[in-house]
Amino acid sequence: MKLKIGVAVAAMLAAGNALAAGTTLNVGMGSADAGKLDPHVATTTPDKGLLYWMFNGLVRIKPGEASPAFIEPDIAKSWTSSEDGLTWTFELRDDVECHGDYGKLDAEDVVYSLKRSANPDISAFAKDYSAIESIEATGPSQVTIKLSENVPSLLGLLVPYHGGNIVCKDAVEALGEEYQREPIGTGPFMFAEYQPQQYVKLVANPEYFRGEPKIKEIYYRYIPSDASRDLAFQAGEIDMIYGKQEQSWVERISEVPGTKVVVMKPGEMSVIHLNMTMPPLDNVLVRKAVAHAISRDAMVQFKGPDVTLAAISPVPEGHLGYTADVPTYDYDVAKAKELLAEAGYPDGVTIKAIHTTLPGMLTTMEAIQALLREAGINMEIETVEHATFHEQIRKDMSQVVHYAAARFPVADVYLTQFFHSDSIVGTDTAITNFSHCAVADDEIAKARTETDETKQLELWATAQQKIMEEVCAVPVVQSMQLWAWKDTLDLGVEVNGSLNLSPPVTEAASFSE
């Protein structure tokens, strides 16, 4: 798939300039292919990382950081909010250009984008924006958002991540269905070409409002095999590589001469979601048996203690609202077998899981499978390509779902998306509630609008306690994001983290001589 004429010209110019050494970045991603490249639809880690380099939000988290403490202007140059927190007004920059020949971005584009993000018929993240009562262009460069209720950290929904990515209205309408494979944004790099199961090519955006990027083209190459990716990096064919989420990978790649290895925040929390509507998992005793059969300590050692944290609560440690004061299920094979017998399964049970072939996730699931087997729990795993995995689990086709996710670091996001009944997969308002959990709806909803910080934290804590008491899911580990790149590549910032799970390749990135 090729660019429209205006962008194609830019692509050819960039390609010509890229003949000079040090202007082409080759990235190796651990996935077989691209999913959907519409930023309001894309949910997979590989797609989010790629889109990060193409889109802006009203605000952004400072490149190289992942915490909301580092929110700063992006398309919006300033903003104000009313005393009650229900009305927000954003003043936009007047020098933001859409990629190609789609013209200058204005308030109407922002309004269109956020309404699209809130539309459940289009957006995978619509539920996040349900409290938005209205979005209006109150001037050519001014957008006003009115809320029906307070939203914990509204600005976090407006960073270029998930629904916060700002699209160009004319491009979306002109491209129609093609937009899922030809994304048009305003960021430092522009979509140029997609070759299925091979690569997506980006080129520098010469009109980028922060300045034309020093890197002129990026090849985002799909290399699902960890071994093949590592070999390509060691051979110099790849400049930047997505790592296997294991300590052994860090130790091995660190020995490659001229290599910089980075362990980035936030961690993706691996959670085993148990479908409470499907026998035998509709029995809480079976779910508790599963929890007792999984050793978090063993999983941390398996993944590597320097790159992994044990997960205790359905909200990741370090997120606003997290509590460790929840029911826990110590590793105890005998207890697991006792619970199965009490539930009427003295000879054990068989449960089924659809799972991605993405290597880092698959090895985690296989290790859990081995642990469960010791307790008489036979977990049959059907593997499918990563995009297919996301499609099928959202159709409620799997008894057990291993989902590894990083989200904006506020408890409300995790609790709403994974454990509120409105988010149950297969429903009109579905997000990622694979367990069909509905035990903490009241606390989750009340916390979202609670203005007293202490009461809000108490509500979030109670929600986590109820979820763990019912064993809607079993949190396992948090795995940090592992990347490596040539030390001749300077990203222009210190990299501590990235909410989008990929390094910040911006206009500042360059290769040294």
Image (spheres, rainbow, N blue to C red):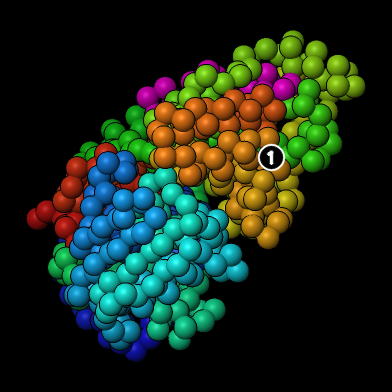
Name the residue furthest front: 83
Q: Which residues are magenta?
A: 288-307
Location of residue 331 (image quadrant): top right
At label 1, the amino acid type is: Ala
Residue 349, percent from left and from top: 83, 28
Residue 138, percent from left and from top: 32, 75
Q: Quadrant of the C terminus?
A: bottom left
Q: Decide if residue 204 is on the left or right side of residue 195.
A: left
In reply to whether residue 16 is colored magenta, the answer given is: no
Which residue: 34% across, 67% down? 144
The chief SS type of the magenta part is helix
Residue 102, percent from left and from top: 33, 84
Which residue: 80% across, 34% down? 282
In reply to whether residue 297 is colored magenta, the answer given is: yes
Q: Foreground residue, 133 or 252? A: 133
Crowd band around label 1 with a 10 angstrom C-alpha radius: few (<14), some (14–19), many (20+): some
Using the image, determine if residue 493 lies above or below residue 309: below
Q: Decide if residue 361 is on the left or right side of residue 510.
A: right
Q: Foreground residue, 227 or 339? A: 339
Which residue: 58% across, 64% down? 120
Q: Which residue is mark 1?
A: 438
Which residue: 79% across, 17% down? 339
Q: Is residue 268 visible?
A: no
Using the image, determine if residue 160 lies above or below residue 19: above
Q: Element type at marker 1?
A: loop
Name the residue furthest left: 513
Residue 236, percent from left and from top: 28, 52
Using the image, determine if residue 136 lies above or below residue 281: below
